[in-house]
Amino acid sequence: MTAAGETGGRRWRFSVRPTPRPARALKSLQLPAFWLLGLILLAGLTRLGGILRADLARYPVATTTAIILFALYAVPFWLFIASMDFLEREPPLLMATAFAWGGAVATTAAIPGNQSVHDLLAKLISPAFAATWGPAIAGPTIEELLKALGVVMIVLVARKQINSVLDGMVYGALVGLGFQVVEDIVYAVNAVSVTGRGDGVGPVIATFFLRGFLAGLWSHTLFTALAGAGIAWFLVRTDKPTWWRAGGLAVGLGLAWLTHFIWNSPLFADGLGSGGAGVLLGMLGKGLPALVMVLALVWVARHREAHFYVAQLAALHDPAIATPGELQIMGHGHLRADARRYGKARCGRAGERAVRGLQTAQARLAVELSRVSHLDPADALLIYCRDEVLAQRQRLVALGHPEAIVSPSRPAVPRIVVLGALGAVLLVLLIWQAIRSMNAA
């Protein structure tokens, strides 16, 4: 059985059974940047291992607890970051590389770098100034530079993976997340040492609440996402003049530095007013504007990218590839999820898997179409991707659910709105509990 589609007067014919995936050469191994990245990661991991081994020798229970808590804490952040680009999923190995750079390279290099800036400020200005403003100057200057270099390294070894501003934000956020997790572990163990009460987990739990829920939303994950957006803007907006692209790069890096500076600054250090409410308002005043800005940037970048990829499939004018109804929901993550739930409601788990398979195949084909200037009937990768879409369509047809669309009786209020509201309430409760723990301490 074959299926045909027309584009620009050219008719293609493909078998419904997918052809074997064409092999790709490991071109990264031929890049000097690949080996440089490997050496730097190895050095960073070695230094981080030395730090953690020393902590485990002194406080085995506290250090193990800190590692477990903050590793679990990273999971929802990782899942959210990975879901940001739901049409063009980033390679897991490359995502892990970005995380490792932030956790092993940026952190271990920032420790001596920050100390050097503190010492320099103390000598040039005064020890009091260095104690008050040192974190606000040293942290953004040293740490944001080191983390941005991680995004640059990703670009050097896998340039084709950076196709949009959203891609840069994903890798930047992962670098920041790695930095944030490792830094929090170090702070937790240091808190144990400062209390001087032996190998206890109390300071670790307190640090987990304070740094996890009071600072976690507007910390390194957010800062480096802005830097990644600027780097990606410079790379992908080749339709703009160089000075305009450089301006976007400067804005991204500048916003990363500025939001980090504001958060580390002594401004509103004691909150606004007295009690937990004043502390909460002070923190929201410093961190919420940056969080809203990043979420708005993600929203805009997501929709621009989704519109671009949906247009690739729409240009085929082939309902066997994507029906008009599927094209309408393809660019919206919550509608794609609703379509999977509708498939499950009608055909059980098999229906859900079939809808997910079709959506994945459609996204893969859209990405590959975007990478070619014209349709080539002999392009093995395009043949594979298109045949995969047709095979997934056949699975849906066999189940009696031929179209991956949402239920006509779906709720008026999207599920994502309800879940978002509940998540916000839960987050506020956790932050409030963290403030109460801080006041009690």
Image (cartoon, grey):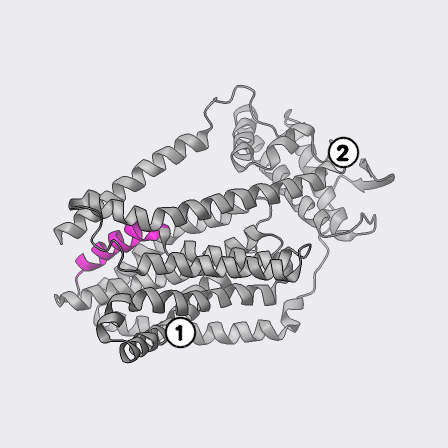
Magenta span contains residue 30: no
Q: 374 or 58, which lies in front? A: 374
**In which quadrant of the rendered image does the N terminus lie?**
top right
Q: Residue at coordinates 67% horizontally, 48% vertically from top-left? A: 367
Residue designated by label 2? 318
In what element is the residue under mark 1? helix
Q: Earlier in the sequence, mark 2 or mark 1?
A: 1
Q: 346 or 257, which lies in front? A: 257
Magenta span contains residue 215: yes
**In which quadrant of the rendered image does the C terminus lie?**
bottom left
* Relative to 191, 98 lies left or right: right
- Gap in angstroms between the C-alphas marked 2 and 1: 53 Å
* Relative to 297, 160 lies left or right: right
Residue 49 placement (x, y as % from top left): 36, 72
Residue 399 in sight here: yes
User: Tag 1: Cα neighbours inside 10 Å, few (<14), some, or many (≥20)?
Assistant: some
Compared with residue 364, is residue 393 higher up or lower down, i.e. above or below?
A: above
Residue 57 placement (x, y as % from top left): 24, 73
Q: Amino acid at mark 2?
A: Asp
Compared with residue 419, is residue 118 higher up or lower down, i.e. above or below?
A: below
- Which quarter of the figure has residue 136? bottom left
What secondary structure is the magenta-colored segment mainly? helix
Q: Which residues are magenta?
A: 200-217
Q: Residue at coordinates 51% horizontally, 22% vertically from top-left? A: 410
Residue designated by label 1? 109
